[in-house]
Amino acid sequence: QSVLTQPPSVSAAPGQRVTISCSGSSSNIENNYVSWYQQLPGTAPKLLIYQNNKRPSGIPDRFSGSKSGTSATLGITGLQTGDEANYYCGTWENSLSAWVFGGGTSLTVL
Amino acid sequence: EVQLVESGGGLVQPGGSLRLSCAASGFSFSTSWMAWVRQAPGKGLEWVANIKEDGSTKNYVDSVKGRFTISRDNAKNSLYLQMNSLRVEDTAIYYCARWRIGYMDVWGKGTTVTVSS
């Protein structure tokens, strides 16, 4: 059972918008930065969003991040079939002095 | 090019030991926190440990405390993970990553560890 809760799967049609939620608590998300990672099948994770809402160089602005209280959200607009992947949120857990990931969300572009 | 390359994975029996290595290039390794993250077959990501630039601070996930040791050699631009008393549940792909405040921005391709009799 992950400290951070994500929906196991989401789906949407090409060109549409999807959001992926990440729910935590005051000991993790509320008081720390959240980051998001994309893992395409058979590849290493890739940083998508850092410090809640910043995009690394090379990440298109179709990807966005936000945080409010104990929850964070990843948004993806203009969905493409190449966006099919697993998405993970992550943050520091103060009570454990450890980094935690959400359980991951599988995105299907129908 | 910023790059991390892991090595040292393999098949080991339960109770055995293995030492993973991660070679860094293209960035200032000696001024970067580093981390290990693992992924069991068909499962999600699990952070394992991280280490401060000078090696003075180390953090571990509870499940590996007392069994795994993270270390680094800044002169060799290398990160290590010494894994002792290995268990079947340690079977995973192990990734090396550069650690920043609140995120991990550079990842290696991973090395596979299989613990089985």
Image (tube, grey):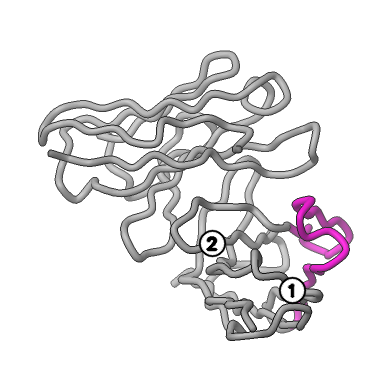
Nearer to us in this view, B29 or B55: B55
Residue A76, placed above or below residue B5 = above
Q: Residues within 10 Å of mark 2 (few under 14, many from 20)?
A: some
Nearer to us in this view, A107 or B99: A107
Judged left or right of residue B89, residue A27 is right
| The disc label shown at residue B86, or none | 1
In the rendered image, residue A44 lying in the magenta stretch gets the answer: no
Q: Count the labels in the image.
A: 2
Residue B80 image offset from top left, x and y in percent: 72, 75
Q: Where is mark 2, residue-wise?
A: B40
Q: Secondary structure at mark 1?
A: loop
For badge 2, the amino acid type reads Ala
Residue B117, placed above or below residue A91 = below
The residue stretch that appears in magenta: B50-75
Find the residue positioned furthest to the front.
B117
Residue A87 image offset from top left, x and y in percent: 40, 43
The image quadrant where one finds the C terminus of chain B is bottom right
